[in-house]
């Protein structure tokens, strides 16, 4: 049988069926399907490829880069924070600074501290002073303190007491030196026997001591109120008051509650620079020796209050005594003419500024132990 065939393919380019070969009528459909499948496969491949390299991939690399940038920013912030915190670290309450009391008023309850490396003075109040140091504050005293983070000009935790070791002590010349690593002086600190509050026999090389530091008019630092820290060295010591002292004989008697009778003492048991100023009512601290039938005082020390600024109210050479008005002490304070240190260029008169070492008698009254005149051009500033 003869099949009549013709080109039914729409894709045939022949002009007439006669030009076409006899072909399978489904061949064109198969070709179209192959082309469609190829295009679908290509589209699927492109979709997979685009999905692999678009948003998620880009977001991954973007996030990685962002993380690195954040890391750099964090490190930069850390470095900046170190630089920015360094000034505040200097104001941290854990860092101790040093300065000198420029002025202080007990009446007003505040004062100012001078520092060599700072232009403005640092203000402090009594509530900022450690309790054990409140009675020893004075103009010229060296103190340690900290600065609050909220203020650059207000001192906190003010301390005027330092601890060190007795480097050596010359008993013949009555002076010595203290080494103290906790201060900024970078040198040993000089002191004299009149600055020692504990018995001379306790002053041994290497002993731990507590002291106040004072910067003199020459700019040098000296120690005051030197006392031994070890309480074991101070056992059997009692307190009493001078009943009388006879300079010509070099001895006197002390009254104290620990003894039923008056206690005898010799000027040899008293610091050499204090003997001249011994007077009735002067408080003493001493070791009570009861080994003899009559009690005796040994290792005698004079108990004084911190030195204060004062103004002479009256003084009479004929009477041999006068009165001063002391800063921070109510009422006038009596002093004897013999209490005035060294011959002066001119006699004391009303209105003159002086410094006074004060003691308190058993009845509570104040008396002057020694009186120092301030030179006219070196009168301390008082708030």
Image (cartoon, helix red, strand yellow):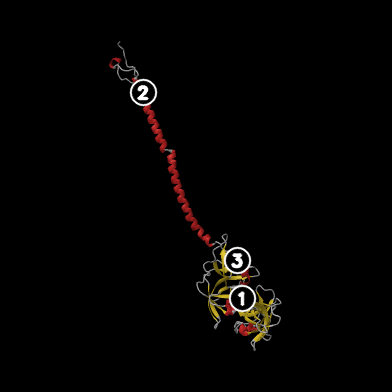
- Residue linked to disc 1: 234
Front label number (1 vs 3): 1
Residue nearest the observer in this picture, 23 or 370 = 23
Q: Which mark is residue 124?
A: 3
Q: Label 3: how many residues lie within 10 Å, few (<14), some (14-19) or many (20+)?
A: many
Left or right side of 17 for 137: right
Q: Which numbered disc flags the more N-terminal residue, 1 or 3?
A: 3
Extreme-bottom residue of the structure: 248
**Which of the two marks, 2 or 1, is nearer to us in this view?**
1
User: Is residue 70 at least partly visible in the picture?
Assistant: yes
Q: Marks 3 and 2, Cα distance to the nearest angstrom?
A: 99 Å
x then y, percent, for residue 308: 63, 75
- Residue 324 can be seen, yes or no: no
Name the residue that disc number 2 marks.
Answer: 32
x and y, in percent, of residue 259 in the image: 69, 80
Query: Of helix, strand and loop, which one carries label 1?
Result: helix
Q: Return the residue nearer the eye: 303 or 201.
A: 201
């Amino acid at each position: 049988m003869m099949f009549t065939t013709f080109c039914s393919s729409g894709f045939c380019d022949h002009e007439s069926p006669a030009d076409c070969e006899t072909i399978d009528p489904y061949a064109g459909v198969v070709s179209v399907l192959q082309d469609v499948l190829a295009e679908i496969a290509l589209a699927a491949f492109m979709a997979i490829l685009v999905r692999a390299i678009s948003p998620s991939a880009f977001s991954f690399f973007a996030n990685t880069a962002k993380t690195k940038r954040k890391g750099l920013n964090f490190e930069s912030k850390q470095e900046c924070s170190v630089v920015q915190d360094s000034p505040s670290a200097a104001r941290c309450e854990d860092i101790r600074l040093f300065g000198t009391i420029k002025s202080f008023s007990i009446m007003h309850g505040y004062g100012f501290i001078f520092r060599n490396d700072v232009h403005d003075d640092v203000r402090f109040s009594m509530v900022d002073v450690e309790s054990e140091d409140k009675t020893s504050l004075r103009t010229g005293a060296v103190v340690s303190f900290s600065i609050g983070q909220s203020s650059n000009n207000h001192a906190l935790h003010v301390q005027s007491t330092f601890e060190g070791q007795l480097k050596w002590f010359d008993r013949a010349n009555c002076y010595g030196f203290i080494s103290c690593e906790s201060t900024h002086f970078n040198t040993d600190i000089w002191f004299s026997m009149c600055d020692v509050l504990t018995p001379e026999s306790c002053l041994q090389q290497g002993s731990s001591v507590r002291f106040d530091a004072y910067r003199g008019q020459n700019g040098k630092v000296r120690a005051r109120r030197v006392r031994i820290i070890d309480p074991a060295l101070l056992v059997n010591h009692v307190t009493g008051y001078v009943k009388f002292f006879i300079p010509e004989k070099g001895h006197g008697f002390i009254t104290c509650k620990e003894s039923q009778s008056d206690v005898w003492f010799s000027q040899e048991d008293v610091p050499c620079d204090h003997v001249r100023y011994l007077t009735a009512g002067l408080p003493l601290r001493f070791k009570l020796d009861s080994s003899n039938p009559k009690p005796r005082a040994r290792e005698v020390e004079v108990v004084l209050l911190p030195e204060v600024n004062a103004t002479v109210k009256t003084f009479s050479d004929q009477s041999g005594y006068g009165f001063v008005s002391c800063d921070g002490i109510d009422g006038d304070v009596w002093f004897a003419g013999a209490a005035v240190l060294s011959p002066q260029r001119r006699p004391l008169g009303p209105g003159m500024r002086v410094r006074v070492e004060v003691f308190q008698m058993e009845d509570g009254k104040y008396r002057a132990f020694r009186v120092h005149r301030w030179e006219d051009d070196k009168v301390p500033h008082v708030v």
